[in-house]
Image (cartoon, coloured by chain):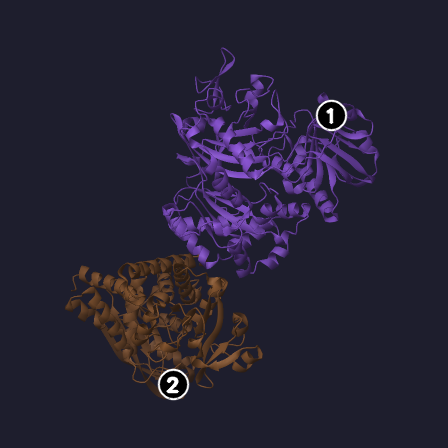
Chain colours: A brown, B purple
Amino acid sequence: MSQAKGFNPFEMAQKQFDKVADLLGLDPGTRELLRYPMREYAFNIPVRMDDGKVKVFRGFRVQHNDARGPCKGGIRFHPQETVDTVRALAMWMTWKCSVVDIPLGGGKGGVICDPHNLSAREQEGICRGWVRQIAKVVGPISDVPAPDVMTNAQHMLWMLDEFEAIHGGHHPGFITGKPVGLGGSLGRKEATGYGLVFVLREALRELGLKPENTSASVQGFGNVAQFAIELYQRLGGRVICVSCWDQKDQTSYTFKKDAGINLKELLDITDRFGGIDKEKAKGLGYQVLPGEAWLTQDVDILMPSAIENQLTGETAPRISRKVRVVAEGANGPTTPEADEVLRERNVFVLPDFLANAGGVTCSYFEQVQSNMNYFWEKDEVLGKLDVKMTSAFHSVSELARQKKLYMRDAAYVIAINRVAQACKDRGWV
Amino acid sequence: MDASCIPPFERQFFEGREDFTRIGAGAVGGKASGLWLIREKILSRLDLAAHPGFEVNVPRLCVICTDVFEAFLSHNDLWPLIRENPPDEDLARAFLRAELPPGLAGDLRALISKVHTPLAVRSSSLLEDALEHPFAGVYCTKMIPNNQFDIDIRARKLGEAVKLVWASTFFAEARSIMQAARVEWERERMAVILQEIVGEKRSERFYPTISGVGRSFNAYPTGHAVPEDGVVSLALGLGKTIVDGGRCYSYCPAYPRTPLPYKSLGDLMDATQNRFFAVHMGPLSDYDPLKETEYLREHSLDTAESDETLRFLASSYDSDSDRLYPGLFGAGPRVVNFSPVLTTNQVPLNDLIRDLMRLSREALAADVEIEFALNLDPKQGLPARLGFLQVRPMAASTEEVAVDAEELAHPAAVVASPKVLGNGTRHDIQDIIYVKPKSFDPARTVEVATEIGRLNQALLDEKRPYLLIGFGRFGTADPWLGIPTAWGQLSGAAAIVEATLHNMRPELSQGSHFFHNLVGFGVYYLAVEPQSGGRVDFDWLDSQPAAAETAFLRHLRLPRPLELRVDRRRGRGVIRHD
């Protein structure tokens, strides 16, 4: 489950954009504007470490486009973070907010660091330092960060606290992903996984398949995958395998049980990063296979829900002919080359920025609730999420049907068109 | 029935093509099966051309199937609490706190975003279907105005109503009734029907002009009528008036013009409907999601007259001539006798009801009970819309039983009645609970009901059927007219005897849930009016040793079973101790 060498996510994002810009016939000015981020910030974050020495970390914030509303996007703590990854993710955030029609733009941030090797105090220093460097250009009405890779609710609270110390007063709408009770929203932890299954449910309905007659293979066993599996199983579906990263062995494994995995028993042997204990899994009757085995299974549905660049021109031909749907829980798991393979095989693709938009949609709900300091019941949050996701799916699939477009292209057409129109309406282009 | 024949809900509801859909893939329960039968087997055969001016249909609805209910219970881990048998209110609160299944929350929001008309959230239980037991009025039905501007509020109210109906599956009364029916209550599953309410908004009220219950078999025919002529009960406003046993107008559809056998106009005016129920569409003073009637309000006939809904329902009393005239004239008192509809036939409703009862009877191959609601044009009467709300079979024994008149005077008769309901014999009743005539106080009937409930539960636990003897009407909503028991408080009774006391009318309201439960559960009913030759031998009862005694009741456990015989054809019943 590693990223291919030389892979540049931003180039891939631009390639996808260019294709749709051609389809839409966008004028050169709009094309130029949307092809690159509106603003990029890169800065140093000096932190006094536990050993008394000062270490300088490199931080980023990229604001791709805010024509439709304040930028929205996570903050990643990752040792291999690059500005191009952040750029690509910021652009995808713009399209993601647009395709589910929430009034937000796209942004992304990151810090080059490895939290595995940092104490809590050092991580707090990075969080507070990140906010000090960027406090003037982020906030509830300009750019709203959220947790992402290796950041969590605790990081968000440190950042919020620093932001409020700088600006004075309370601004819970500055950041999302906060704990429930401290400005967080109920339903947030389920949102991305559930959102994925809401659109999957609609796709199956459109294909005339009953969930109880389908099986699935899932890559990843983190938050998204876990809740997606839970809801998919509640609909009657059978997940026969999951694949996840083993921190100790520094490789990934696929855990398979033909009769269907038992989510609860696997969760009981899973660490906080989503790694399954392989010895205990064997004891429970699971086959432990190589990491990539998840994508060659004879199932109806593939749910790549881990990291980007997993279905490639090389791996996609190995997908079983039985697969009818690919539901992308991860960001950017499929390369354009793999898309060609899926399109040829008439596989119904639920593109990432639609399929995993449940998270940002619920973040938007959290921000709305935080701004008015009034919080909803979980039924209300998940009900609204379902309606939003289902409605977004139908807009995309209807366009795909009408214009005979590939689902990813149809989703991009809707998303990019909305953003381009907002830029035009504002008189930017 | 197989739920798959019902099209799935497509998040369009009122805009969608389908007017009868389902959410989920489990069972749809008894009531929804009945509604599907109405649509497919009854209304499809109705010749609407014979009833010009009427639109007849099943009001638009969506059923939440039992698998969604099961998902709700398991997802929220509610079974342990249910098995603790908590008080109804605690159970309802726990259900309201629990989360809706994610897909359902979305479906309800989608539905509510399109629907702004009041909705009835109705129970449709699985066992009701499987056992052909009615459980009438046992589970909650909640009507919601659904007129708030904010979709979030409407969705929340709808969700609360669905959860309340689900919770009512395990309320004490429901469990007690299932116990009486020898059914394991844990097997019960609940589907929920979301259905538009037939009616119209008048000021802050929403209600149909007329609600009705029709039964193809009448246990108490009067005049020339025979039991097979059936009986229809009509009321102004929501049907709650009828099913709760309130004042309504009952007549024989074969003789709609025959006035009811009241001794005088004064009696008729005393007995006429003078209040009606409507869904409250205005601001609420209390928020009480646990209350089934949270949005229902009672109003007077004056309100109906100002709403212009009385025109075809009432007659007016003229004191100069001491007569009633159909319609609204002068300032005299109004009597809701449906005269303009039934006598002068300005709205030929009776012909339509007879057709519907006939077709229902044919479709079910049994005597039936139907429920309907009707909205009339306020000026002309027609066009009118009739919403067909329910059909269910009336269980009736066909055993040949003969009870001669002389038997009523037999010295061994503990109870003799010339007015009965039910048909058949029993030889397994050894327990009697009776209200002690000497300590009975009409002002303390609520306490009597509580005592009956306690003894009933004890006998249910022992699985012993019993004979219950009391004064006035059981199950009455008015404690001054009898003993206001809920059905669950006497659900173990094999036979019920209502004796007359001064100022207490023992007549049953034939459209009431209580009445229907009597029929549905095969409980024998014997009315005892001394002037008609009936009697209860209280001297004999008092001479027997008591197994238990409370302030108002005695419980006897006899060494040998009683002999109970009820003859429906002759309308007589006798219970003997030898």
From the viewer's perspective, is residue A335 above or below residue B163? below
Circle 2 residues within 10 Å: few <14, some 14–19, many ≥20: some
The residue depicted at 72 percent of the width and 43 percent of the height is B455
**Residue B475: image location, x then y, percent:** 63, 36
Q: Quadrant of residue B410?
A: top right
Q: Is residue B574 above or below residue B89?
A: above
- Tell me: residue B185, above or below residue B243: below
> Which subunit holds the residue at mark 1?
B
Which residue is at a point 21% across and 69% down the rendered structure image? Answer: A34
Disc 1: which residue: B534
Q: Is residue A38 visible?
A: no
Q: Amino acid at mark 2?
A: Met
Question: Element type at marker 2?
Answer: loop
Q: Nearer the viewer, residue A213 or B522?
A: A213
For disc 2, the marked residue is A49
**Chain label for disc 2:** A
Badge 1 and badge 2 both on one subunit? no
